[in-house]
Amino acid sequence: MKRILIILFALAAFPIAMTAQNKEINDILDKYEKRKSVESVTISSDLLAMAGKGNDWGGKISKIRIVSVDSNVIENNVPIRVELKRDMDELVLKFKFISALKVKDGNEEVEMYINQNKSGALLFLNSSKEEFAVIAMFGNIDDKLIQTALKGGISIK
Amino acid sequence: MKRVSETEVILLIEKYFNAETSLSEEEQIRDYYRRTPDVVMSNELKAYRDMFALFDEERESLNNDSIVIDKKSNPLIRPYLMRWISVAAAAVVLIALFLSGPGQSDSLKFYIDGERIKDKELALNMAETNLEKVNHMMKGLERGERRLNALVKADQSISALERLNSKLSQN
């Protein structure tokens, strides 16, 4: 009986341990989600399954989270976008994300980071004069999905 | 216990119905009925036999219940059971939390300025707008890459023409 309970406990804890990185991304985004002057959307499983039907990325992405902060929002003398960028930079270093590319077009810049894994993540940090946005995609991050993302092919409508 | 005579029992029963008997006197009445066979008992006393026998049965059942209570409060059994009940309860809570963890029940969450907005269309528009900005940059990158490839091909063609021209000039 004791052994069965220990095994049940281990089975319940194992998936949580495996996605520590994804948990930390979610924790950071949760921190900003409900703040003033922040827009946040989380789309998961069912809706994504419908949106991804027939697409290259269909069935691979289990959740998309987007947090967008206006540039002029300041809290405790620090612009929130600076705080968010710093948190994301630290996370990228901590979990050794691969820096895939950095694209600049006028005053807009996009950084793309990859953690290629069955329970991995794709991160886009989109920075412009007006705002800063983090787009996090969770799921089975494989070559095909990365290629689709590089071609600008991920859309939910 | 002192054995009572029939006369004394009759007096005790009278006292009993007047609620004047002590516990030991009531025990004397019961003891009389337990020890005295029916054949030597007067009819008057036989009438009360069943009543005092019933009281005796009740008392016995109460005594049995108290024995059961004692078993339940056995210091060795209780903590052992409680420990396993608490372990099982913790396992159930853990599994329930995992199965119904955050984000698993809501397929769409949308916040603006700290307020939850239940507008699916607006939420999807916001997501698509942000994705489109990224897609636009990526497509721009792809266009740039195509132009670069075209320039490389053009350069290769020019180099081939130059080599041909050079050979023709020599001749």
Image (cartoon, grey):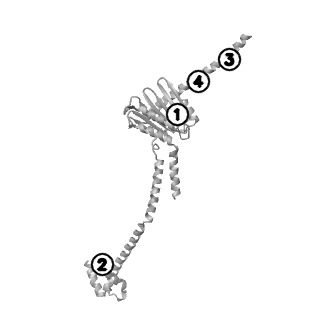
Q: CA distance from mark 3 to mark 2?
A: 129 Å
Q: Are marks 4 and 1 in contact (CB under 8 Å)?
A: no
Residue A113's disc is 1
Question: Which of the two discs, 3 and 2, labels the residue nearer the N terminus?
Answer: 2
On screen, residue A35 above or below B164:
below
Tell me where residue B157 appears, x and y as whole percent.
65, 18
Closer-to-camera residue (B59/A126): A126
Q: CA distance from mark 1 to mark 2?
A: 90 Å
Q: Amino acid at mark 3?
A: Ala
Residue B23's disc is 2
Foreground mark, 3 or 1, reads 1
Tell me where residue A116 appears, x and y as whole percent.
56, 37
Of all residues, the one furthest to the right in this rendering is B171
Residue B146's disc is 4
Q: Amino acid at mark 2?
A: Leu
Q: Secondary structure at mark 4?
A: helix
Q: Within the image, what quadrant is residue A129 found in?
A: top left
Residue indicated by mark 3: B160
Q: Chain of mark 3?
A: B
On screen, residue B105 above or below B71:
above
Question: Which of the two discs, 2 and 4, labels the residue nearer the N terminus?
Answer: 2
* Crowd around label 3: few <14 · some 14–19 · many ≥20 (10 Å): few
Q: Chain of mark 2?
A: B
Tell me where residue B30 appears, x and y as whole percent.
33, 81
* Crowd around label 1: few <14 · some 14–19 · many ≥20 (10 Å): some
Q: Are marks 4 and 3 in contact (CB under 8 Å)?
A: no
Tell me where residue A120 appears, x and y as whole percent.
53, 39
The residue drawn where x is 26% and y is 82% is B14
Q: Are marks 2 and 4 in contact (CB under 8 Å)?
A: no
* In this rendering, position of residue A140 left or right of residue A132: right
Foreground mark, 4 or 3, reads 3
Q: Chain of mark 4?
A: B
